[in-house]
Amino acid sequence: MKKTYYLLGTVLAVVLLATVLFSGCTRSSGSTGGSAINSNLSQSQSSSTDQTVTAQPSTSSSAAKAIVNDGIQIVSTTLDRGIYDPVIVQTGIPVKWTITANDGDLNSCNNKMLIRSYGVEQKLLVGENVVEFTPTKAGTINYSCWMGMVGSTITVVDDINQ
C-alpha cells in the first residue's frame, strides 16, 4: 500500500514539474522577442545548431530591419507571448536591439533569451530591454528561449540597404 502511494506521489510530482517548466513554451517559432541587456560575452562561442551560414541570406518582409545611425545598428521588436521576432542586421556594425516586453507577455519560458553564436544570455523584464552584439559574418543566426522551445532568427547581411 505504501509503495502505491509513493509511486502515485512521484508521478504527480513529475507531472506538476513538467507543467510548470513547459508553461508558456507552446510555440516553437515566431516573430517577437523578449527584453534583454547583453553583457556581450565572447563572440567566438558557437554551436553548429546555432548558426547556419548561407551564401545569399534571404530576407523576410516580416522581419524587423535594422537602421544604421552614427555607426550603430538600431532595431526594435515587441515581445508577444510565446513569439520572438526575426530581425535583419548587417555584418561588422554593432547592433543595439531594443525588445519591449509588456506586462503579461513574459512567462517562465520566454523570460530568458539566448543567442549562443554571440554569447548572449539575457534575462528579459517588463519594459524596454537592450541586446548588444556585433555580427561578424553573413548568414542566419538562430536564437531561442533558455529551453530552446521558442525561437527565431537573426539574418545577417553584407549590406542592409540592399
Image (tube, rainbow, N blue to C red):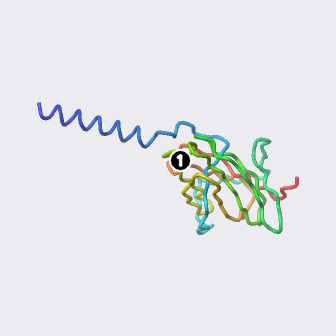
Residue at figure coordinates x 60%, y 45% from the top left: 151
The x and y percentages for residue 134 are: 71, 65
Residue at figure coordinates x 81%, y 59% from the top left: 158
Q: Quadrant of residue 93?
A: bottom right
The x and y percentages for residue 131 are: 65, 60
Q: Nearer the viewer, residue 3 or 132?
A: 132
Q: Callout 1 environment at 10 Å: few (<14), some (14 to 19), or many (20+)?
A: some
What type is the residue that disc 1 sits on?
A: Gly
The x and y percentages for residue 25 are: 52, 40
Instruction: List the residue tagged with mark 1.
Output: 148
**Left or right: 28, with 21 as reference point:** right
In the image, residue 43 sits, relative to residue 148, either above or below, namely below
Residue at figure coordinates x 87%, y 55% from the top left: 161
**Left or right: 33, with 17 as reference point:** right
Give the SS element for disc 1: loop
Q: Residue furthest right?
A: 162
Q: Nearer the viewer, residue 122 or 92?
A: 122
Q: Residue furthest left?
A: 1
In the image, residue 121 sits, relative to residue 83, either above or below, namely below
Residue at figure coordinates x 30%, y 39% from the top left: 13
Q: Quadrant of residue 85?
A: top right
Quarter of the image with the N terminus in it? top left
In the image, residue 86 sits, relative to residue 15, either above or below, namely below
